[in-house]
Amino acid sequence: MRKFDTKVQHLKYKVLRTIAKHYWNGQLTDNLLDIPLQIVPGKKPSMRCCVYKERAIIGEMVKLAMGGDKNDKNVIEVIDIACDECPASGYEVTEACRGCMAHRCEDVCRKGCITFDEDMHAVIDKSKCINCGACAQVCPFSAIINKKRPCEKACKIHAISMAEDGEALIDDSKCIACGACVYQCPFGAISDKSYILDVIDLIKGSDGGRAYKLYAVVAPAISSQFTYARLGQVISGIKELGFHEVVEAALGADMVAWAESAELCEKGFLTSSCCPAFVDYVGKYFPQMKDNISHNLSPMATISKYIKEKNPDARVVFIGPCTAKKAEILKPEVSPYVDSAITFEELQALFDSRGIEISELTDTALDNASYFGRIFARCGGLADAVAQGLKEHGAEFELAAVSCDGIDECRTALLKAAKHADGTNFIEGMACKGGCACGAGCLTHAERNRIQVEKFGRESADQTISSALSHIDRSVE
């Protein structure tokens, strides 16, 4: 599998590619029930205990690929039938228990959960256990472990629990749509809704640019994806799909860095507005700090707004690594500017549904943004860009930024800021560990992604923000 990290991603891609291929030809409804059979044609299962269960799960994946449950506002959904293989989470006593005399685990347990069998090995009564972990902390043999489901372990904000029937349950009031659970679930039981059919409608509706100009706004993380082809070939492939022009979201990042640095000077303290999952996190978990979020739209929304101001009839599709962007485009302050959003996974499915082999295409240059706009895709890039913005503004402001790589670091920085515990005046928040270059919708999540993003930034013809903004009109013709 040259294109994906895991077989789960590959199965998801096959579903997306298949429905897209039928939809291009106007034959999707006729083939809807046959799609699971097309993907699993044999009589033997390839991933599950039963071929019929495989097909039933793929049928649910087809629904998500077609937009999912319209009544469910969350862009992340659980496929219940696929979520039945993981053991229940909680503390368990392993074979490492020596049946010692101290019984510290019993003494520390406030709920009386721990008893001992005939061999004096500890046993935990799950009906009483509250998973406080006190017993695990005092065990001298580290014989008590906290066994967590992959989705629960991936969710750093504790938005996932277990329903009565054992399947994962997402608390929408807590979820920030970061997609960490989507990537980490080893059974593909949690997935993001797809807008791939909406994008095909937009491509068809543009009528080759005669009805309206269709723009693709691509995240800078694209430079680290599609490793089997050159970036210029990927851009050519996007235009081959039917897009009028491809514009860097990084150009929007230049605009944001320029405006955000000025806003920081004026207000004295800000948290970033670029990562929609982080913005949602602040709103849900640190509501007292909502007013400190930068009032700038995200780079995606900022450049899309500019495109529509220059071309009122234009349509815009965002292509990136982020599942939370699918939630962001539904917000009233963003929806007028971005018509749809897909991930890199879905872009690969679109290419293959049209038989576009990007590795055989000639290159199309992508030269909209500055170095500083492009490095937004890695942790620390936004803080570097704001520092550059302050420098180019000639501002006498001493930046004390903290760059947060993942929600755990975001939480720590926000707690300190809420208590005025340090001198930080700018918090760059990134929900995904590794930054946008390792987002849930990426094809690959390797450490090299960050290095590739930095390399892409160095290749920019514009090494200042103001230089990139000086010819912005040329980029959105």
Image (tube, rainbow, N blue to C red):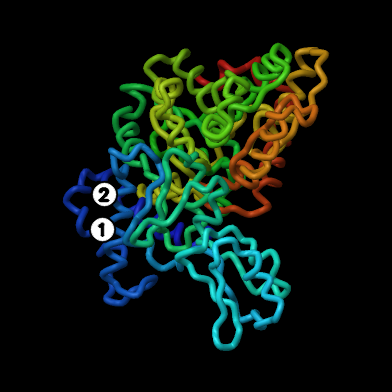
Question: Which residue: 48% across, 35% down?
Answer: 325
Q: Which residue is mark 1?
A: 35
Q: What is the distance, in whole Å, between disc 1 and disc 2 at their CAs?
A: 10 Å
Question: Which residue: 65% across, 68% down?
Answer: 107
Q: Which element carries disc 2, helix, strand or loop?
A: helix
Do residues under tags 1 and 2 come within 8 Å of each other at their CB atoms? yes
Q: Residue furthest bottom?
A: 119
Q: Is residue 330 left or right of residue 105?
A: left
- The vertical placement of 460 against 80, above or below, is above
Three-letter amino acid code at disc 1? Ile
- The vertical placement of 442 against 118, above or below, is above
Q: Position of residue 98 (x, y in %)?
A: 67, 83
Three-letter amino acid code at disc 2? His
Q: Which element carries disc 1, helix, strand or loop?
A: helix
Q: Is residue 64 left or right of residue 118?
A: left
Front in this rendered view, residue 144 or 39:
144
Q: Which residue is mark 2?
A: 22
- The vertical placement of 218 against 16, above or below, is above
Query: From where the camera sits, is residue 466 visible?
Result: no
Label 1 or label 2, whichever comes before in sequence order: 2
Which quadrant holds residue 279? Answer: top right
Question: Which residue: 59% across, 58% down?
Answer: 132
Q: Residues within 10 Å of mark 1 (few under 14, many from 20)?
A: many
Question: Which residue: 38% across, 62% down?
Answer: 166
Q: Position of residue 290 (x, y in %)?
A: 57, 24
